[in-house]
Image: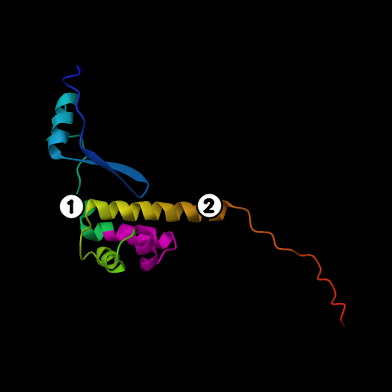
Amino acid sequence: MTSKERRSIDCRRVELDGTTYVILRESEFEFLCQRAGLDSDRLPPGHETSPEQLDGASLAERLVRRRRAAGLSQAGLARRAGVRPETLNRIERGRTSPDFATIRKLVVAMNAAEHGALAATLSPPQETSHAPKKPNPRK
């Protein structure tokens, strides 16, 4: 590839349920398929995305499952992510579809909470003192 053919690709990365996805414009996707010699209209089986995978209800279900597994309340996750609790509530009920920036905030906050919970389970228990109490000399 010559320097004239090199170009940057406008894309965003997002991690959901431990999987990193790259979101890019369809025109970028078409360009990459063309460069790779692939027909973007005829991808191999398994590359299709069903509407159920992209709908708000499915996103809401995964979000609620991860939030509960991390031991967070809606208010706790909203506070960590810097979003209003009302907004998170609407997302989790499938009443609204969040924009990319909101999804990113929620994912970052969820990942931090999950890593914190994992670290807490792996750390050794705190030792408590079992030394006998000294007798009170005033008695």
Look at the image and tell me in which quarter the C terminus lies.
Answer: bottom right
Q: Residue at x 22, y 39 (%)?
A: 11
In this rendering, is residue 100 above or below 3? below
Q: Residue at x 29, y 64 (%)?
A: 88
In the picture, the disc for residue 119 is: 2
Q: State the CA–CA distance, disc 2 to disc 1.
A: 36 Å
Which picture quadrant has residue 31?
top left
Q: Residue furthest front?
A: 138
Which picture quadrant has residue 102?
bottom left
- The local secondary structure at tag 2 comes to helix
Q: Is residue 37 in view from this perspective?
A: no
What coloring was used for the rendering? rainbow
Q: Nearer the viewer, residue 9 or 97?
A: 9
Q: Residue furthest top?
A: 2
Q: Is residue 91 in view from this perspective?
A: yes
| Residue 41 point in image, percent of width and height | 12, 35
The region drawn magenta spans: 60-81
Q: Residue at x 36, y 51 (%)?
A: 108
Look at the image and tell me in which quarter the N terminus lies.
Answer: top left
Q: Earlier in the sequence, mark 2 or mark 1?
A: 1
| Residue 33 point in image, percent of width and height | 17, 30
Mark 1: amino acid = Pro
- Per the picture, the main secondary structure of the magenta-coloured stretch is helix
| Residue 26 point in image, percent of width and height | 14, 39
Residue identifier under label 1: 51
In this rendering, is residue 1 above or below 84? above
Labels 2 and 1 touching (C-beta < 8 A): no
The residue carrying pointer 1 sits among few (fewer than 14), some (14 to 19) or many (20 or more) residues within 10 Å by Cα, namely: few
